[in-house]
Image (cartoon, helix red, strand yellow):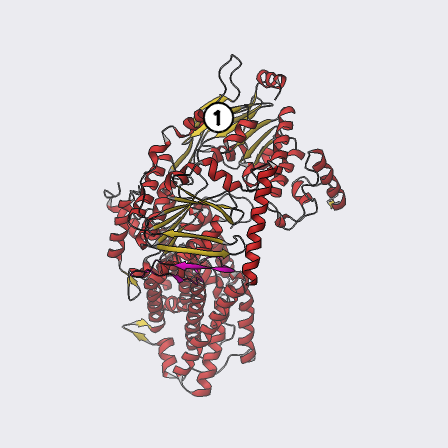
Amino acid sequence: MQDDRSAARRVLDFVGAQNLSLLIALAAVVTIIGVQDANFFSPRNMMAIGTTVAIAGLLAAVQTVVVILGALDISVGSITGFTSVACAMVFTASGSASLGVAAAIAIGLASGLVNGATIVYGRVNPVIATLATLATFKGLAQLISGGRAQGYTGGDDFFIFLARGSILGIPTLIWVLALVAAALHVLLKYTDIGRNIYAVGGNDTAARLAGIAINKYVIGAYALSGAIAGIAGVLLTARTGSGQPVSGSEGLELESITAAALGGCDLRGGKGAVPSTLLAVLLLGVLSNGMTVLGVNPFWQNVAKGTLLAVAVVIQQKRSGERAVGLPR
Amino acid sequence: MSAETEALSDSSTAILRLEGVSKGFSGVQALSGVSVECRAGEVLALMGENGAGKSTLLKILSGDLQPDAGRIVVDGTPRVFRTPAEGHRAGVRVIYQEPEIIPHVSVAENVYVGALPQRFHWFDRRGLIKRCRADLERFGFGGMLDPEAIGNKLSAAPRQLVEILRALVGEVRIIAFDEPTSSLSNEETTVLFALIERLRKNGVAVIYVSHRMQEIFQIADRVAVLRDGRYVGDRRVRGESDGAPPLKEEEVVRMMVGRDLSAMYVRETHPPGKVVLELDKVTNADVEQVSFQVRAGEIVGLAGLVGAGRTELARAIFGDMPIDSGRILWGGDEGSTGLRELKLKSPRDAIRAGIGLAPEERKTEALLMRRSVRDNTSLAVLEKLRRFRFVRRDAERELVRKYTTQLRVRTPSMEREVRTLSGGNQQKVVLARWLARRPKLLILDEPTRGVDVGVKAEIYAIIADLAREGIAVVVISSDLPEVIGLSDRIVVMHCGRVTGEVSRAEATEQRIMELAMADYLHSTPTAHASGESSKQSKSGMSSTAGAS
């Protein structure tokens, strides 16, 4: 019944309808912007898009894991700011870049564990729990920094390499994103851990009754999310040359959730994939870069991102055929 | 019923007609071209096995589902109910077993919800409670329900009374009950039947869905039978006016089943092996002092009414509900003949010990509906299929193929999403999951609910095979012929307690029903008294045990 599929059908099955529509959208946006401004295609601008996308991409990739599990982490942006400051301050105090990086990842991990424990043992809805910690972590970042940029990492070779270096002609920032995203993709698709994450998100009762320790998975996913937000914090510090409590990380939660939704993650859990999310991140990055290149009022960018998130979810819900009665699940 | 009301209902024309109603869900045709009618002042019993399409028909009548084809005609006018609210306005009400109750408000507000008396949006709580009390009296429910009680504190029976009251305070013309008595006590059932009688006299068309033959013959005028989504026919309960003989139970069963039931069960005795599970006075919030044994290669039926605590007991054995006292003893370890106590903190512990559970609600509790047959089948064995945490895909495919073939799961490919399969095939996927895990004890909670007759027979054969391979099987079922046909031994529960054990040889529906209803059934004073005294002696035993 399925063996005599046409070649086109097989290609579509491999790429996926979601990815195909993203690719078409990406091509359309690139064409429109490219026609209006030839500078858009300059290698310099391409690299700029890549490096801008790296931090949001890290968070979107790990948000994908959390969303597949059936939850949300809206504190990722705050953790990024928090760890950015911590990284710069530890580096300044110790003079060691590796200590700075370790501190950022450790603090991110701990923040994620707080999220996970609050949700599982405090029985708090994930959105509410991470909304609360979004404020808490942002406040902590402002407290330890006095609300100002901290330290100077622009003179350290390691941070310079992170921010502006390249391997095989590809910027280090993009390498970091690629490695993390590949690791998350393998985790989700090829390990029993990943399979169980899909199971918990698809039906947590069924997962529990099939012997999956779902608490471990929830806490683990938030810890992972926090640790990767810590890596994002290190990248933010490297790019700006100092620890940034708020600037550069605010709004990343919206961007990461938008990317996950645009990439076809079902916000009710159980469905999604890292590569599709990355395509969506790229689309968002090109869109925002294009708007800058074309001189559109930057405030429009928030309007565009917010609208995209809503539209992506509306399309998803229409596809699933849910009836329009009362509050959605 | 008197002769004149009979004549009255005969002369009146149908106020409700369902014409050629069809409804399909992904992969399953729940109803195909069903036409039924119901007259004013008539009680029509709608019968059929689980999965025959009764509930779907009621949902279409209420406006909760839309038919794919066919129409609803009320008083000669075709009507379309897009929501239950539109049905209510046309006087159509369906009372479900588990009605929706608004949790944090009073019974009174629950009854008049959607039509709260108000003046300029000012809500008169006192007046409402008074009115509710008056309405309760008027309909004969006085003293059975407190209008000020809070919704989520109500148990099943009062919830249903609230739902019935909702219907009565509106202008009801057509009312349908979906297995109303399964959650009601004897006293409440009597009140309900009196009420139905009154509705009939007031010219309301009553549709009554029930599995209980006795009730049907007590209150119905006519019986209509559905089978596998098709209309089989209808019969008058008390014979035609031209002197045709009154309806017999066997006739209804024959219409429902359409085949000889006994052929469905594989009748063979299993030589019982060592004790795999022993429950020793297991007690928790829902069950009390439950003790029995299950041996390898034995099929033990767990019978009882809905709410008897069978599902809760299964959950306790599976580590999903804590036990307060008593012990769960396990003898399923390879190469050991002794029993050790199991202290289970989660289903994970139970599965590792060698227990499997196929829960009652397969869609919400067992299956990942939007994942593939492969994912669903291998879910409980992934930890055995991995190498350095990577799932060995070839081994997984081979395993899934083996068990889906063995159970004859009908699916075009193992990558198909489970939601596209029929109910019976979905159940087979759940069974395949546990077969792949190779448990020593498998608990099946209502394994054939919502499964069509053909697949039922296959599932019975699978269960018999499992026992032959030496697996201890516990089957929870509310379907008496099924429990009797399958089990080597039947443990009957009532109100959280074991009220008796019946061997295959002595198992009859009558005997099991008596045990399942325990103190309710016997209305004769002597039987009741003996039930009381046995209860007392049991509690006396437990108190001495506690003291010693």
**The magenta segment:** B320-348
Q: Relative to residue B255, is residue B346 depicted above or below? A: below
Q: Relative to residue A39, is residue B278 depicted above or below? A: above
Please state if B389 lies on the left or on the right of B172 as rendered.
left
Query: Residue type at mark 1?
Result: Ala
Residue occupying the far bottom of the picture: A94
Please state if A282 lies on the left or on the right of B140 as rendered.
left
Q: Looking at the picture, how far across and down is residue A255, in whole percent? A: 46, 62
**Residue of label 1:** B224
B33 drawn magenta: no
Q: Image point 60% across, 16% down: which residue?
A: B7
Task: Say how many tags the image has.
Answer: 1
B347 drawn magenta: yes
Residue in the foreground of this view, choosing between A51 and B52: B52
Quarter of the view holding residue B177: top right
Residue in the foreground of this view, choosing between A65 and B168: B168
Q: Relative to residue B340, is residue A157 depicted above or below? A: below
Residue A200 in view = yes
Residue in the foreground of this view, choosing between A313 and B11: B11
Quarter of the view holding residue A27: bottom left
Q: Looking at the picture, how far across and down is residue B297, in whole percent? A: 32, 49
Please state if A298 lies on the left or on the right of B258 as rendered.
right
Residue A268 in view = no
Residue in the foreground of this view, choosing between B289 and B163: B289
Q: Looking at the picture, how far across and down is residue A165, in whole percent? A: 34, 76
Q: In the structure shown, which secondary structural element does the residue marked by tag 1 occupy?
A: strand
Q: Looking at the picture, how far across and down is residue B401, in whole percent? A: 26, 49
Magenta segment main secondary structure: loop
**Quadrant location of the N terminus of chain B in the rendered image:** top right
Chain ID, mark 1: B
